[in-house]
Amino acid sequence: MKIKSKILIIAGSDSSGGAGIQADIKTATSLGSYALTAITAVTVQNTEGLKSIVSISPNEIKNQIIYSAKDIKPNATKIGMLHSKPIIKKVFESIEELNLKKIVLDPVMVAKGGARLINNEAIDFLKKKIINKVSLITPNIPEAEILTNLKIANKDDMIFAASKLINLGAKNVLIKGGHLNTKKVEDVFLSNSESKLFISPRHKTKNTHGTGCTLSTAIATFLSCGKTIKKACELGIKYVNSAILTNPKYGKGHGPINHLNSININKRFS
């Protein structure tokens, strides 16, 4: 497989390997992209929960971004865990300095086990400075509720929340519907000019750790290869669905998905 593009990933580390920067690198690599990284935090976690978070210095996060991306210019950028206002400010400065385009923001705010990963001051700054700078924002239901101060109980609520994010300055929004108790998973895509409802089968499994990280990186990878935002969302959702369906059933809690589902090995190894 030849490398098709380069993406910059700004996110936290997950020691269990199922989410965060580890999942992002696996996703980008399996879809044919070269990953540059800037780590925002080191987390101690496994499939059963989050134990601790150690922040990286905001200046060092900016240094990672600038030093890497000035040498190898990315075709797209994925932003994940930004858990404090000083970190968000430095990421914002980096976006401005590098004039980055094709940015996908996954507003990581709540861990799979329910732990809050960002404070209110950081959320306010994110809404004021980052949302209108990115090409796409991909919140799940709890994150969309935090960003919009709305309660989301159904598809119509998702559409209303997406429209509120558009009014806040977002160019494109994909609200993921996996948290709703529905027979099928419905993801809502909305921009100023078009909308789309992506309907996917719901797989009965607890092994969904890192699906949000994986989806946003998959979308960024498809964007980096020249796909439109709506098409990148469609292809990213298909990739994640396949990864959930073929999950390796690791761990005692919410296990990882199969990031290698897109790779076929044709050679025999002796």
Image: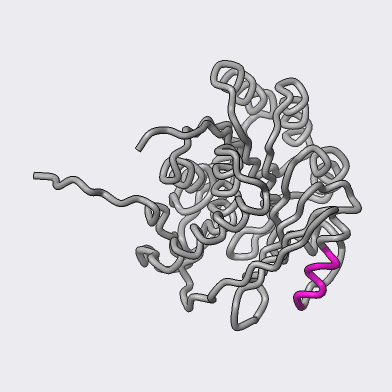
Viewer-nearest residue: 209 or 230: 230
Please state, as top left, top right, bottom left or bottom right, where the N terminus lies in the image. Answer: top left
95 sits to left or right of 222: right
247 sits to left or right of 229: left
Measured along the vertical axis of the image, is residue 204 above or below residue 166? below
Q: Does the magenta run of residues contain 158?
A: yes
Viewer-nearest residue: 85 or 72: 72
Q: Residue at x 89, y 50 (%)?
A: 168
Measured along the vertical axis of the image, is residue 217 above or below residue 209? above
| Residues rendered magenta in the picture | 154-161
Q: Residue at x 80, y 60 (%)?
A: 146
What x and y, as percent, mark residue 234? 60, 58
Hey, which quadrant is residue 61 in on the image?
top right
What x and y, as percent, mark residue 15? 46, 47
What x and y, as percent, mark residue 116? 69, 57
Residue placed furthest toward the bottom: 183
Most common secondary structure along the magenta stretch = helix
Viewer-nearest residue: 239 or 141: 239
